[in-house]
Image (spheres, helix red, strand yellow):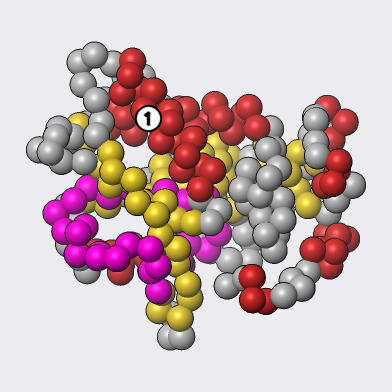
Amino acid sequence: MAEMKSTVENRIQTDPLVISDSFEGYSLTYFNLPLHYRDDLQSVLIPYGFVQDRIEALANQIFADWHINLPEQLICLCVLKGGYRFFSDLISKIQLNNRLHNCRSLPMSLEFIRTRNQPNDQLEIIGLSDLHRLKNRNILIIQDIIDTGSRVDILKQKLEHFQPKSMHVVSLFMKRQSDKACIFKPDYCGFEIPDHFVVGYALDHNEYFRDLEHVCILKESVMSKYKIIDKRFTE
């Protein structure tokens, strides 16, 4: 039987840690940064260590919330590409809880998908060969960032057609945009960030910056430097 449990005492905050609009990030001079990106960054918005600590807190709370016993598993569904780094670190920290707790553990199954927009607000799901396997299963969708929330909302609606037992979403970032309302709130979220163009920790700009550890603000003046040269390598 799968059961979600939570207590008021010692509960970790699953709503995002809000970074204010007035915060412009930390000076680059305090951080080790790759030479090939250093001149293109404006500041470090969230240092790598801070990201890791917040992921650990989310992992601890997910472990505390979910009580699942074999043969059932929590289906952890990674939304690629940007979600791979968050997914990997979150799962590792949940696995650490499994090793450290003798009284119980959280069985997991790991799956990977990509999504692609289609005409008429449709979404193609690429990766899972048989979505009917999700019937009567507990699903945790894991992704990197939510801005308007429209894509993850459509994804969740589409997966609900396959009748999972439960479905929850965890996102590392939510982007706050003054001109666009977010229509979807994840069940677990790491940070709510201002409307900056952020890169690093697997967040990219045209497939660059995924190899940057810290979450940084990209200079607007360098956007054209990383323009798409060959559209065959993008979706």
Q: Which structural element holds mark 1?
A: helix
With respect to residue 172, does 124 lie above or below? Answer: below
Examine the rendering and report whether any part of residue 131 can be seen: yes
Which residue sits at x=64%, y=76%? Answer: 232
Q: Position of residue 158 (x, y in %)?
A: 30, 69
Q: Which residues are magenta?
A: 124-151
Residue 154 magenta-highlighted: no
Q: Position of residue 110 (x, y in %)?
A: 34, 45
Q: Position of residue 230 (x, y in %)?
A: 72, 75
Q: Which residue does the numbered mark 1 point to in the structure image?
A: 94
Which residue sits at x=43%, y=85%? Answer: 120
Numbered marks: total: 1
Which residue sits at x=77%, y=73%? Answer: 229
Q: Amino acid at mark 1?
A: Ile
Q: Is residue 128 left or right of residue 119?
A: left
* Between 18 and 145, the one nearer to me in the picture: 145
* Between 204 and 67, the one nearer to me in the picture: 204
